Image (cartoon, grey):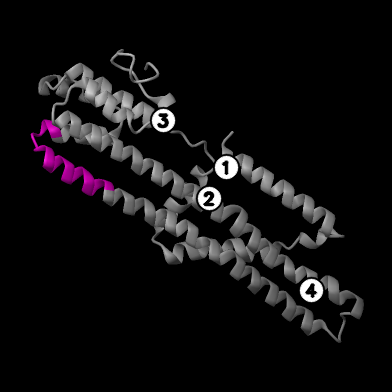
């Protein structure tokens, strides 16, 4: 189970406990029109503020937020060092390894080496691609976090609509004893909006941002590895250089020299 799901469950359990012991009649929370207004309007704003493709990426980011986050840096370092060990600077052997490379960005970098780009050219190309991908990810995460401002706003709208309805009935069929319960219903919309923003959207936005940073870090490690291969560095140097990006207990020892840490 991912930490996001654990946190999500705990947050709602604690909140549910407080609500249960604070509100006398829980039926007042059954504000279906207010819920539909807040959720439906927030979804509408996502499409108004973004393109259809960007909105789809936002929903995908929200779904991915509930999945377990996997640190792939050790796997990436192992793959790069393995390629360095097998090829040892030989372009012909490097071309044979293309079909075995799993990480797409690493495969791109090896392709640039095989296309005989100079090391500084490879560095420039891959750095630009990292920057471009960073902007792509930032657009998605920024769009997701921006959605958090809408549920509370629409919650207030739902509250105002309910209060207008109460005021219309005041002095008519609405009795003095019904005034409090009727106004309580109006405040439910505000509660729903606050919960949706702070218990769902904002945490998932922070989660998405953390995933983006991890993905960019992976690509930066790949860039370092490709540059080492392009400069035909010794496999041992490649291993120790890339191990610098890993925690001590996660360092790999593909070459079996005993200095890298855990054996692959």
Query: Is 105 colored magenta in this rendering?
Result: no
- Image spot of residue 14 (x, y percent): 73, 48
Q: Are marks 1 and 2 in contact (CB under 8 Å)?
A: yes
Residue sticking out furthest to the front: 259
Classify residue 178 by image quadrant.
Answer: bottom right
Q: Which residue is mark 3?
A: 247
Q: Is residue 130 left or right of 203 when viewed as pictured?
A: left
Q: Please give the label number shown on residue 4.
A: 1
Marks 1 and 2, the one that precedes in the sequence = 1
Tell me residue 139's x, y (percent). Answer: 38, 57
Where 226 falls versus 20 (above or below)? above
Q: Image point 38% across, 27% down: which residue?
A: 74
Number of on-image labels: 4
- Residue topped by disc 4: 183
Q: Earlier in the sequence, mark 3 or mark 4?
A: 4
* Helix, strand or loop for disc 2: helix
Mark 4 vs mark 2, foreground winner is: 2
- Compute the Cα span from label 4 to label 2: 32 Å
Disc 2: which residue: 204
Q: Which one is earlier in the sequence, the residue at label 3 or at label 1?
A: 1
> Taking 16 as reference, is 201 left or right?
left
Question: Mark 3, residues whose alpha carbon is within 10 Å: few (<14), some, or many (≥20)?
Answer: few
Cα–Cα span, label 1 and label 2: 8 Å
Callouts 4 and 1 close, C-beta under 8 Å = no
- Prevailing secondary structure class for the magenta stretch in the rendered image: helix
Q: Residue at x 70, y 73 (%)?
A: 159
Segment tinted magenta in the rendering:
113-130
């Amino acid at each position: 189970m991912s930490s996001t799901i654990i946190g999500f469950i705990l947050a709602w359990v604690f909140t549910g406990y407080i609500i249960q012991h604070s509100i006398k009649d829980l039926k007042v929370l059954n504000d279906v029109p207010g819920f539909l207004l807040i959720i439906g309007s927030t979804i509408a704003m996502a499409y108004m503020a973004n393109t259809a493709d960007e909105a789809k990426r936002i929903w995908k980011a929200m779904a991915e937020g509930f999945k377990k986050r996997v640190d792939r840096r050790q796997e990436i370092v192992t793959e790069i060092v393995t390629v360095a060990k097998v090829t040892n600077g030989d372009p012909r052997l490097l071309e044979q390894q293309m079909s075995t490379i799993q990480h797409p960005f690493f495969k791109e970098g090896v392709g640039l080496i095989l296309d005989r780009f100079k090391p500084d050219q490879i560095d420039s190309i891959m750095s630009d691609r990292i920057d471009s991908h960073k902007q792509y990810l930032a657009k998605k995460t920024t769009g997701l976090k921006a959605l958090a401002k809408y549920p509370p706003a629409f919650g207030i709208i739902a509250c105002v609509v309910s209060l207008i309805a109460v005021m219309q009935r005041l002095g008519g069929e609405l009795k003095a004893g019904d005034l409090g319960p009727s106004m309580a219903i109006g405040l439910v919309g505000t509660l729903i909006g606050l919960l949706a923003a702070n218990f769902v959207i904002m945490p998932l936005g922070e989660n998405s941002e953390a995933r983006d940073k991890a993905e960019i870090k992976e690509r930066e490690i790949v860039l370092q590895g490709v540059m080492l291969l392009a400069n035909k560095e010794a496999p041992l140097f490649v291993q120790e250089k890339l191990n610098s990006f890993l925690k001590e207990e996660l360092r790999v020892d593909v070459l079996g020299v005993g200095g890298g840490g855990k054996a692959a």
